[in-house]
Image (spheres, rainbow, N blue to C red):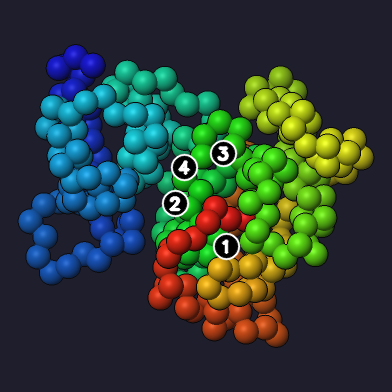
């Protein structure tokens, strides 16, 4: 990336950082702030980058950021879709196709996620690719940020990787499989018939899982709007929760949040999540 583009990228990042108030992203304002908007270290924290790396980007002296880092920066800075695309152009990276792990999350949905501080919550795509999680969701479900390709879809991991099922009781596996397949068929029908991401995901599942192939052939269809689930947490045991969904206007993204099921001890267990944190949690279920 040329020096001019480096400088333009740095200037753009700085301009977007300076317009955001800490409260907009769930950070305390503090009595003494010497800069407008966010500090560089705060953006680095929100994007999962080192402070030194982010400082280099703003100074126009850093290396070309990866597509994953650009997606993280777009979310940290609450960029609009047009601003996100501009960021990728400045970094000389292709704009990601909407629907994958680097999908743009609408700032309004991110704002809601930021405000859900006392309950696990995350944003996923209609193909069950996790885009962003709050700390309590990571503590309950595990960190889903490291998956790429078809493995980024939890549905794919559910049918092809036995470890993905560990956080649901075995008695619930059959029902979860049916629900995942019916939801995926509904999402696939809503998209264009030639959608490459759907074709790749479904094709890989048909080749890799006899269970999926059998369920897919039944043609059941039903979006998952709310569920009552039992999640097996490695430290807390079985936590029974209600999983609620808020859909984006085009249906391609969902904000999920988890509340304790009435008549159980789950409220107390969920209250312990912030204490337990993410200690040695495996990749988890949704």
The tag earlier along the polypeptide, 1 or 3, is 3
Residue topped by disc 2: 110
Residue topped by disc 4: 146
Residue topped by disc 1: 257
Count of numbered marks? 4
What's the distance in space between the residues labelled 4 and 1, CA to CA? Answer: 21 Å
Residue topped by disc 3: 152
Does residue 78 appear to the left or right of 208 in the view shown? left
Does residue 147 appear to the left or right of 194 in the view shown? left
Image quadrant where one finds the N terminus: top left
Q: Does residue 244 sit above or below 17 in this rendering?
A: below
Image quadrant where one finds the C terminus: bottom right
Q: Please provide percent x and percent y for residue 56.
A: 15, 34
What's the distance in space between the residues labelled 2 and 1, CA to CA? Answer: 13 Å
The tag earlier along the polypeptide, 4 or 1, is 4
Circle 3: is it few (<14), some (14-19), or many (20+) Cα within 10 Å?
many
Circles 4 and 1, Cβ within 8 Å, touching? The answer is no
Label 4 sits on a secondary structure element that is: loop
What's the distance in space between the residues labelled 4 and 2, CA to CA? Answer: 19 Å
Q: Please provide percent x and percent y for residue 126.
A: 65, 42
The tag earlier along the polypeptide, 4 or 2, is 2
Label 3 sits on a secondary structure element that is: helix
Circles 4 and 2, Cβ within 8 Å, touching? The answer is no
Circles 2 and 1, Cβ within 8 Å, touching? The answer is no
Q: Nearer the viewer, residue 31 or 178?
A: 178
**Quadrant assignment, res 229:** bottom right
Circles 1 and 3, Cβ within 8 Å, touching? The answer is no
**Is residue 126 in sight in this rendering?**
no
The tag earlier along the polypeptide, 2 or 1, is 2
């Amino acid at each position: 990336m040329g020096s001019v583009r480096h400088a333009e990228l740095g200037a753009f990042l700085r301009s977007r950082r300076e317009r955001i108030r800490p409260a907009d992203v769930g950070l305390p304002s503090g009595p003494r702030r010497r800069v407008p908007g966010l500090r560089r270290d705060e953006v680095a924290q929100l994007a999962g980058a080192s402070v030194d790396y982010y400082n280099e980007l703003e100074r126009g002296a850093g290396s070309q950021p990866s597509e994953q880092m650009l997606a993280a920066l777009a979310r940290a800075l609450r960029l609009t879709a047009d601003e996100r695309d501009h960021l990728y152009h400045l970094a000389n990276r292709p704009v990601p196709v909407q629907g994958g792990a680097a999908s743009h999350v609408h700032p309004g949905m991110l704002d809601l996620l930021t405000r859900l501080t006392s309950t696990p919550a995350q944003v996923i795509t209609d193909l069950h690719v996790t885009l962003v999680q709050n700390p309590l969701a990571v503590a309950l479900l595990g960190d889903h940020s490291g998956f790429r390709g078809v493995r980024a879809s939890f549905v794919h991991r559910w049918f092809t990787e036995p470890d993905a099922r560990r956080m649901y009781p075995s008695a619930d596996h059959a029902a979860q499989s049916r629900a995942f397949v019916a939801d995926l068929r509904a999402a696939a029908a809503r998209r264009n018939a030639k959608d490459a991401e759907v074709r790749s995901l479904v094709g890989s599942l048909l080749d890799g899982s006899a269970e999926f192939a059998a369920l897919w052939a039944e043609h059941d269809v039903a979006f998952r709007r709310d569920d009552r689930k039992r999640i097996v947490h490695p430290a807390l045991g079985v936590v029974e929760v209600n999983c609620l969904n808020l859909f984006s206007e085009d249906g391609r993204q969902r904000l999920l949040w988890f509340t304790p099921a009435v008549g159980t001890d789950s409220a107390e267990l969920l209250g312990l999540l912030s204490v337990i944190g993410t200690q040695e949690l495996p990749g988890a279920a949704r």
